[in-house]
Image: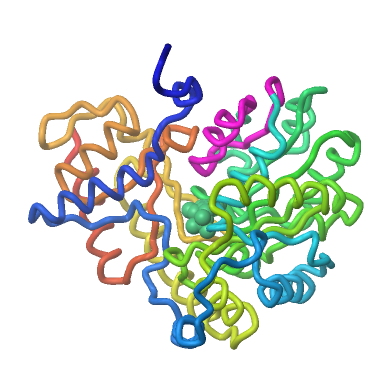
Amino acid sequence: MAFLSDMLSRVKPSPTVAVTALARELKARGKDVIGLGAGEPDFDTPENIKAAARAAIDAGRTKYTAPDGIPELKSAIAEKFRRDNGLDYEPGEIIVSTGGKQVLYNALMATMNPGDEVIVPAPYWVSYPDMVRMGGGTPVIVAAGVETGFKLTPAQLEAAITPRTKWLIFNSPSNPTGAGYSRDELKALTGVLMRHPHVWVMSDDMYEHIAYPPFTFCTPAEVEPRLRERTLTVNGVSKAYAMTGWRIGYAGGPAELVGAMKTVQSQSTTNPCSISQWAAVEALNGPQDYLETARAAFLRRRDLVVEMLNAAPGVSCPVPEGAFYVYPDIAGCLGRVTPGGRRLETDEDFATALLEETGVAAVFGAAFGLSPNFRVSYAADDATLREACARIQRFCAALS
Ligand SMILES: Cc1ncc(COP(=O)(O)O)c(C=O)c1O
């Protein structure tokens, strides 16, 4: 009898977490490493939010809470959905979890049966396919390459749907490409979904607030209200308010699904951290000016990074609509040899050589299901980004 679960043979550890850990380890050993692998804002959590957490501790709000979140946070979330997305969710249609990641995990655990298919456009956030597999389902990966701006087309969606399709996982702006669907592009996808009433949509809106004009964010249940009854709208405070360590994510969706997710959660983590929930109340209800400050900084950095990477020989970097990632193509670097004598056959070779020979840590494209690319997170200060991009330029220029 095997000791470890068979499920583990279907999943692998998160490669983005692994790159971040390796960069941290090399740094601790004294190597000059610039980590552009992590998907988190470099800003500190705004002071008003930290103060709300301190106040929660002082007030003794340190006990178990309702599994699906404190009523005050659920009401702040309902208001946020109304204010930003024009969506009305009742308290029974809202759940708070330990990060957006646990929201997605709960939803898949609550709905996956063997043979169920989940459409995952690639490049994808690394956890989607593995979470689907952990639930016993089958990810159906559909490549959405640079020729369509890294976006799934209606024809691709139509072709991927089968009678076994349970979910489409939709993520805009996207991790890892930063691609954002316009209202018309999204409307075209929801049009396809209206013809297939058995398909649900899991909309991962984690990067909603990091969107660069003229692009404006929209979400499926808002664009096609008739889809609301089969849409889970997922969001969180991690990326928007620089709160990755606080671990608060949330979702709005049909009560039956949300209730099932609550059951999964009540038998695993019980409830998200009480103190973090009070901090999230302040994040959503308090002053929102941080959002604009962060967006302006990320926009400046996006332009800096895109320009510098496009100046690196063999690299082609599209301009993303949102999030804090770029996903350059490195086809022009493959088949060449680094100054350290490595022959670059894959984007994983590229990212490994880049880290070992220049100290820049970024994640290889194969981890996100679309090659040959690499993902750069530009959630770092301008000077650091300038130095990292200069190193990438020198590395690419020195390939022979
Ligand atoms: C697209 C996407 N969804 C969900 C998450 C998870 O967010 P959280 O840190 O709130 O669990 C991330 C974090 O990297 C992400 O990039």
What's the magenta region? Answer: 114-140
Q: Position of residue 244 (x, y in %)?
A: 45, 64
Q: Position of residue 65 (x, y in %)?
A: 61, 67
Choose between 166 and 66: the one closer to the eye.
66
Which quadrant, please, contains the N terminus? top left
Tell me which corner region of the image, top left, top right, bottom left or bottom right, holds residue 249.
Answer: bottom right
Q: Is residue 190 left or right of residue 277?
A: right
Q: Is residue 374 left or right of residue 151?
A: left
Q: Position of residue 236 (x, y in %)?
A: 59, 63
Which quadrant, please, contains the C terminus? top left
Residue at the image position 81 percent from the left and 56 percent from the top: 221
Q: Position of residue 274 (x, y in %)?
A: 54, 70
Most distant residue in the left direction: 30
Choose between 320 and 364: the one closer to the eye.
364
Tell me which corner region of the image, top left, top right, bottom left or bottom right, holds residue 74.
Answer: bottom right
What number of labels is visible? Answer: 0
Q: Report the colour scheme.
A: rainbow
Query: Does the image show residue 319?
Result: no
Decide: is 392 above or below 373.
below
Query: Does the image show residue 78?
Result: yes
Residue at the image position 42 percent from the left and 35 percent from the top: 367
Most distant residue in the top direction: 1
Q: Is residue 115 magenta?
A: yes
Decide: is 57 above or below 146.
below
Residue at the image position 26 percent from the left and 71 percent from the top: 383
Residue at the image position 56 percent from the left and 50 percent from the top: 102
Q: Is residue 309 left or right of residue 98?
A: left
Q: Is residue 342 magenta?
A: no
